[in-house]
Image: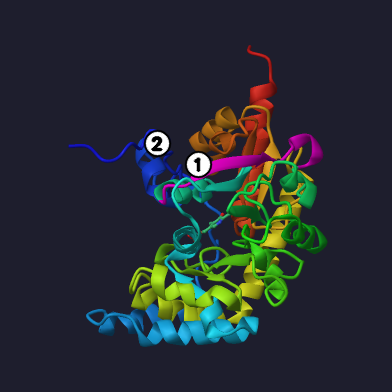
Amino acid sequence: MQPRDLSSHVEYVPGRGVEEVARDLGLDPDELVKLSSNENPHGASPAAIDAVRGAAEDISIYPKAAHTDLTVDLAEKWDLTTEQVWVSPGADGAIDYLSRAMLDPADPVLVPDPGFSYYGMSARYHHGDVRSYDLSKADDFEMTAETVLEAYDGERIVFVTSPHNPTGATMAREEIEALLSGVDDDSLVVVDEAYGEFADVPSAAGLLSEYDNLAILRTFSKAYGLAGLRIGYALVPEAWGDAYAKVSTPFAASEAALRAAIAALADDDHVEKSVESAEWAREHIHEHLDAPTFDSAANFVLCDVGDGSAVAEAAQQAGVIIRDCSSFGLPGCVRISCGTETETRRAVETLNDVLADLEAPEP
Ligand SMILES: *Cc1c(COP(=O)(O)O)cnc(C)c1O
């Protein structure tokens, strides 16, 4: 027997891991700098790490109380009801919950190109179709309501990423409002704010009281440094928040992840430090990299290097792992995550050497 026809499905291409690259190159993992997956270079809050240790005692029990507690904390943080907070295994899990809640078979979704591949993957898992709108490199990947509405044709879900991955661009609040008003009543606009903490603009969550066709995605994977635990959430309008009970996988967020998220949420200092560090790193990359860069409001910078895969490959040989953006449809670009000061300086120096070498005529 065979699975159903998966020929239109694509596989997620993750940034390469340190262990994997170290093995290939015959290097010690400690000699490598990994700036390919937008993780927090300062790790998680110490309080979150303690919480995970504490949770170890209780892992034989299904997580229930911790789920309720995190939902209550998040509802308070965002000034929403608990039904409006859809806790999930990573923001990716929340994308699945929204697909389950919205898509009938063959319903189309509209996704940005370049963009985050999981939106389309999730739609396909749920028997939906995928269409895309173009973000133009010539316009610095600018995102306006018009950019999206030009391509929009009644899709059931419209995805916007702000700050955008991999470009770092944000969509202005007026533009998000224009988009919300410009689509049909039964088209859901999902604003993915996976990098929201790093941006100096207010969350679109403030619009949830005015629009019932809006959902926001947030994660603990980036600014909070909990990528390995898989914990995130969606914020949805009150009108249909109760659908969560019908679409969520029971106990999908683990006890350890929930407790870590509760602790991380209470440690404002750690998030603040992480955000300041990313601001410094992005400035450093903009100023010192010998290649054009795009303005970023996130914890990474997209760089126009000519041949992304050659540059990423050469940097990796030199021990610096960055993201070749070919899989995003940007073969000329690489994306560098913001590291610690030492890591970021080393990445920029290495890349500048690589760029100089690639430009030099063959001897
Ligand atoms: C990292 C990321 C996510 C979700 O990450 P999770 O680890 O599943 O929470 C969602 N959207 C974008 C654009 C991302 O880059």
Pick the front one: 115 or 98:
98
For image coordinates 74% across by 37% down, the residue present is 136
Q: Do the residues under discs 1 and 2 have CB atoms within 8 angstroms?
A: yes
**Residue 144 in view in this figure:** no
Q: Is residue 6 magenta?
A: no
Number of disc labels:
2
Question: For residue 81, what is the image quadrant?
Answer: bottom right
Tell me where residue 33 appears, x and y as whole percent: 52, 49
Look at mark 1 in the image and give the residue it sits on: 319
Amino acid type indicated by mark 1:
Gly
In this rendering, is residue 151 above or below 202? above
Gap in angstroms between the C-alphas marked 1 and 2: 9 Å
Q: Tag 2's secondary structure?
A: helix
For image coordinates 47% across by 68% down, the residue present is 226
Pick the front one: 41 or 201:
201
Tell me where residue 205 appears, x and y as whole percent: 67, 72
Look at mark 2 in the image and give the residue it sits on: 25
Q: Earlier in the sequence, mark 1 or mark 2?
A: 2
Using the image, tell me which numbered label, if any, was put on residue 328.
Answer: none
Image quarter of the N terminus? top left
Q: Which residues are magenta?
A: 126-140
Amino acid type indicated by mark 2:
Leu
Tell me where residue 7 appears, x and y as whole percent: 38, 33
Question: For residue 222, what is the image quadrant?
Answer: bottom right
